[in-house]
Amino acid sequence: MGGVLLAALLALVSVSRAQAVWLGRLDPKQLLGSWYVLAKASGERGFALEKATKNIEGVVVTLTPENNLKMLSSRHRLERCDLNVVELLRQDAGWVFENPALGVVEFRVLSTDFRDYAVVFTQLEFADEAFSTVELYSRSQLASQEAMRLFTKWSKGLGFLSQQQAELQKDLTCAHKAFQVSFPQNVTWGSLHRRRSQGARGAPTSQWAGGPLPQPEGRVAPLP
């Protein structure tokens, strides 16, 4: 799976060294604030069957004093909305974050204008399941055509089938739960991931088979 994803990324991304350096130097503070999750592609078991019932989700990103990302998210699962908090540690390579102890092997921004949208890739690895997701973050409740185009292109390019992709239902109830609360103290990865993190595989690497992923794409490096 890792080799396939790497090949897909290499086929999709054509970024000059100067452009890669530009993206790597961006200030993480540009990702901070509230985001709607309007679309998702996922290899998680059951996602294809449940996607028609999934509503728009919310993510609030803040920065810790150590320059790690702290993310409060409201995730819609069947008939409930889970609030989750996770802190992601920054890797040396640009816009790549992780928390292997909790099963988060990689969190990276694939494409963004840091104003209206961001296409975000996450690789998760637990004892009972390993899978990846591509999500469309949006500052507003409606995604632009350009944002949807990039989300679709990245999802297809990374090998997600049509049944593994979904525009989330336009119900904002779950999303607003994340926007309406402050970060609770001493809370880690939410209910779903607390259960799984007990079996998170030890010290997963931050590389795919074949080496590190290419630098992500920014607005100055449009997809072909």
Image (spheres, grey):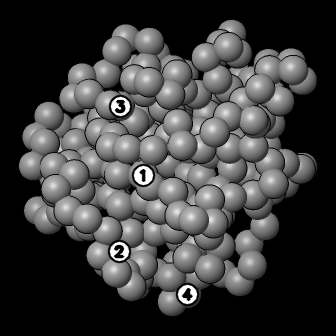
Kind of residue sitting beneath label 2: Gly
Q: CA distance from mark 4 to mark 1?
A: 26 Å
Residue at point 26%, 65% (across, down): 182
- Judge left or right: residue 191 versus residue 204: left
Which comes before the other along the chain, label 4 or label 1? 1
The residue pinned by badge 1 equals 61
Q: Nearer the viewer, mark 4 or mark 1?
A: 1
Determine the CA span between mark 3 and mark 1: 13 Å
Report which residue position mark 3 lands on.
138
Q: Residue at x 68, y 58 (%)?
A: 90
Instruction: Please report contact status of discs 1 and 2: CB closer than 8 Å, yes or no.
Output: no
Front position among marks 3 and 1: 1
Residue at x 31% of width, y 21% of height: 143
Dot 1 falls on a residue whose secondary structure is: strand
Q: CA distance from mark 4 to mark 3?
A: 32 Å
Frontmost of labels 1 and 2 is: 1
Label 2 and label 4: CA atoms lie apart by 15 Å
Where 183 sits versus 2, above or below?
Answer: below
